[in-house]
Amino acid sequence: MEDDARVLRNARGIPASVGSRVRGLSRHATRTYPGGAPRDAVAVDLLAPRPQNAVMRAAVVHEHGSFDQILLEERPTPEPGPGEVRVRVRAAALNHLDTWVRRGVPGHTFPLPLVLGCDGAGEVDALGAGVTNVKPGERVSIAPGFGCGTCEVCAAGQDQLCRKYGIFGETRDGTNAEYVCVPSRNVLPMPAGQTFEEAAAWPLTYLTAWHMLTRRLELRPGETILIHAAGSGVSAAAIPMAKLLGAHVIATAGSDEKCKKAVDLGAAAAVNYEKVDFAAEVRTLTKKRGVDCVVNHVGAKTFDGDMKLLVKGGRLVTCGATAGFEMKTDFRLVFFKGLSILGSTMGSLGELHEVSRLLHAGKLRPVIDSAFPLARVADAHRRIADRAVFGKVVLTIP
Ligand SMILES: [Zn+2]
């Protein structure tokens, strides 16, 4: 397998070896490609010099599956349409959504092949017709979501509720590439001194956390909030935010090391749910009172304990269910205690600007776990599947 630099390689650099042929591999007519030749794949020499800007490298999923389904390949560099800007991506960040796109979700169809990646940051590189809000060369973070911009909820500033709402890397090509085109309203200026890695690390999870805390829970100063899975990107964002909003934060995590990091981020206390019954421990920590709010994106695993811990009038918000989709509860708890169970996905573009202001003011700072070059995107995916991860896994795209 030596003269095969022309072979499309997967993200670990391993030549594809099973499946049907890739077009254009004249010297390697028997070379094959997992799961079938991709529509947009071109045979390229990954080691040879490339014509400037004609093609770009990108991490692409053609078929759902394991880590080896993430292929590093070359594609034509996209051109910005009217109202769009092209960003030369310098860093991208991984989210659980990338994992779902890679693995697939039963009953849901993704528009494959798809360039992965919701979060990214880089320099504005080219402007489409009519763009006046940014200039080439500006350093920007990319807002991960986009509504249609014209419907009733978009007009009301709730684009995350738009029927046509989309996310880069889920409904159209994403940020795990050297270039991406986005609507011009989807770029936000980076604070001075912020690195591209930091600028890529915050948008999706910080928006998600901010929307949950401020719009869904309406968290108030002095309230006690329980935030599960402190090491996740969303919780690592939510802990310092909740503290900034004046709340008393109790976190849970799966190791003593993560508990310590949660306290460093601003939690007043952190409970290792692998060692103790988290509900009993939180009850003790709150002198049997319980908590006003819960952030649960774990799902069923903690739900029962959460419902019992909530005080009368308490609120629980969820933006995911990484450890079990089905919740069971005693309705008597819900109505007797007047509880609210709230769902949340993303947040509005306006809210993203609110968070951006807090980053510019130095009141929040992205939490980065580790960084990998784009060529090792599959290793980055392995890292987010690793329970040791704390904060964001970032890709660098020099
Ligand atoms: Zn809309």
Image (cartoon, grey):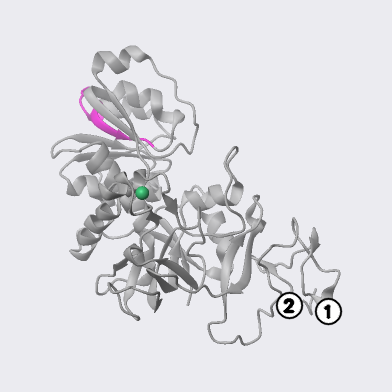
Q: Which mark is residue 113?
A: none
Instruction: Residue 210: give x, y in percent of width and height.
Output: 27, 48
Q: Nearer the viewer, residue 281 or 78?
A: 78
Q: Nearer the viewer, residue 369 or 214?
A: 214
| Vertical arrangement, residue 253 with respect to residue 290, above or below | below
Instruction: Residue 316: give x, y in percent of width and height.
Output: 31, 31
Q: Does residue 238 appear in the picture of this structure?
A: no
Q: Amino acid at mark 2?
A: Arg
Q: Nearer the viewer, residue 135 or 301?
A: 135
Q: Residue at x 21, y 65 (%)?
A: 360
Q: Which numbered disc flags the more N-terminal residue, 2 or 1?
A: 2
- Does the CB distance between marks 2 and 1 fall below 8 Å? yes
- Over which residues does the magenta segment extend? 284-296
Quadrant position of the N terminus in the picture: bottom right
CA gap, disc 2 to disc 1? 9 Å
| Vertical arrangement, residue 244 with respect to residue 300, above or below | below
Q: Residue at x 83, y 79 (%)?
A: 27
Q: Does residue 127 appear in the picture of this structure?
A: yes
Q: Amino acid at mark 1?
A: Arg
| Residue 285: in magenta span | yes
Specify few, some or many for label 2: CA neighbours under 10 Å numbering under 14, 14-19, or 20 or more.
some
| Residue 110: in magenta span | no
Q: Which residue is mark 1?
A: 27
In the structure shown, which secondary structural element does the residue marked by tag 1 occupy?
helix
Q: Which residue is mark 2?
A: 6
Residue 149, image quadrant = bottom left
Q: Residue at x 27, y 72 (%)?
A: 133
